[in-house]
Amino acid sequence: MGTKHLYIETYGCQMNEYDSDRIKNALDAEPTDDPKKADIIIVNTCAIREKADQKAFSGLGKYKSIKANKPDVIVGISGCVAQLYGDTLLKKIPHLDFVLGTRAIPKLPEIISNIESQKRRTVETSYDLEELFEVEPYHKRGKVTAFVSVQQGCNKRCTYCIVPQVRGDEVNRPLPDILKETTNLIEKGVKEITFIGQTVNSWKENGYKFGDLIRAAGEIEDLERIRFTTSYPRDITKRMIDAMKEVPQVCHHLHLPVQSGSNKVLSNMKRTYTREWYVDTIARLKDAVPDITISTDIIIGFPGETDRDFQETMSLMREIEFESSYSFKFSPRPGTPAAEYEKEQTVDPDIASARLSELQAFQKDITEKKNLSRVGHIEEVLVEGESRNDPNFLSGRTDHNRILNFKGTKDLVGKTVQVRVTEGLLNSLRGELVK
Ligand code: 5AD
């Protein structure tokens, strides 16, 4: 058989995107954008909310007819939904050939070859697998940004969250491995690295802490920008803040999910900090890095959330004025403590929807206001590629993680340029190149 073609559909977070790229490399197959041309089809799934996990099933449903027409096609599910439901998926989905858990990517070649030789459907969802980080991700030629995973799993026990169940306990990757993967990417032309982990700043390994990782990355030649996500508030230490202040490549943006502005709700979520502590932490960050921008995540309608709790969240939104925020309606996940609370303290779905709309309308105004306030400023932009909507425009991000589009030619891709902002829109900025 000649080169195999792989089609992979990805849902969810950066870790899933990263894992999809690892799957591409693990298989040594040619990625294709057309599932009809594929020999292997994989849906890499997200279980964070019920909606996301339903997407996995409708995603897989699309490939039923392809499999019916071409029985040799191998169809698999990977990621968090695969880990969550395991072998029940094989029963539920007759055209499925394998279920690959979140820690099993290095096993994939073996699984595929077993299916080919023995036509046996396979489930691999063990947590005891070694060589967790073994397969490095596929890197698309010419791409100037990349993720590097520094950790798998999570040791926090937020009562709403399914992640510890589907990604296991926290395992931190050794510093030399992280630096090696980063250096390899730089050699391929990457200029900006985003370190990723479920609670990235809780990373610690062999006596090193997260601040040391930032400093070590700062020593890598030709690495122009360092980002990391997602940070957990309680793991923000002085060592980390000092590193952010002193390492010039670190971008001045932090994603710091607060989830709620009510201490009662935060406590029921087991977030381990209070509103006051969070506000103080932002003050410490701004003290060290005055122009830092903060984005956040909010859950609306957590069991027992009263109107007063919601008003506290709104007052926090007004107090901090986040650069942007992702907000979600609470979704009960199987096996989590909050799914139990939900049975007794459900927030009326209409009330939750109204609260969500109110919060999102407020955020929209703030984001627009902040984007407008950049007009006239000169921003440094790392050019990532042509703009999606217009090939005459280039697109990149500012230090503060805003998208900035401007007229320019393709030879600027990969360069850091100065752009004067001329327009502030809701989701991006527009500007013109400064000579
Ligand atoms: N319901 C709704 N939102 C959730 N999140 C995590 N678990 C749930 C849940 N059960 C949100 C949190 C988290 C983001 C990635 O998803 O805000 O920060």
Image (cartoon, rainbow, N blue to C red):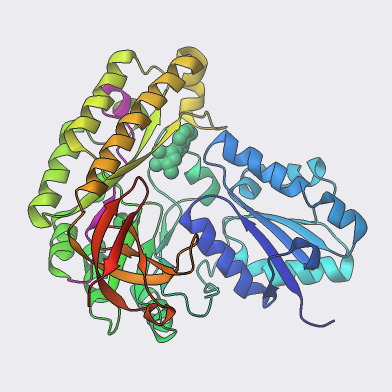
Q: Is residue 25 magenta?
A: no
The x and y percentages for residue 332 are 52, 28
Residue 92, picture quadrant: top right
Q: Nearer the viewer, residue 406 or 32?
A: 406
User: Left or right of 96: which side holds 167?
Assistant: left
Can residue 262 be seen at all in this image of the molecule? no
The x and y percentages for residue 157 are 40, 39
Rendered position, 294 above or below 434: above
User: Left or right of 263: which side holds 120?
Assistant: right
Residue 101, picture quadrant: bottom right
Residue appearing at x 64%, y 42% in the figure: 55
Rendered position, 141 above or below 355: below
Can residue 295 be seen at all in this image of the molecule? yes
Q: Which residues are magenta?
A: 248-266
The x and y percentages for residue 143 are 46, 75
Residue appearing at x 53%, y 49% in the figure: 12
State ligand 1's quadrant: top left
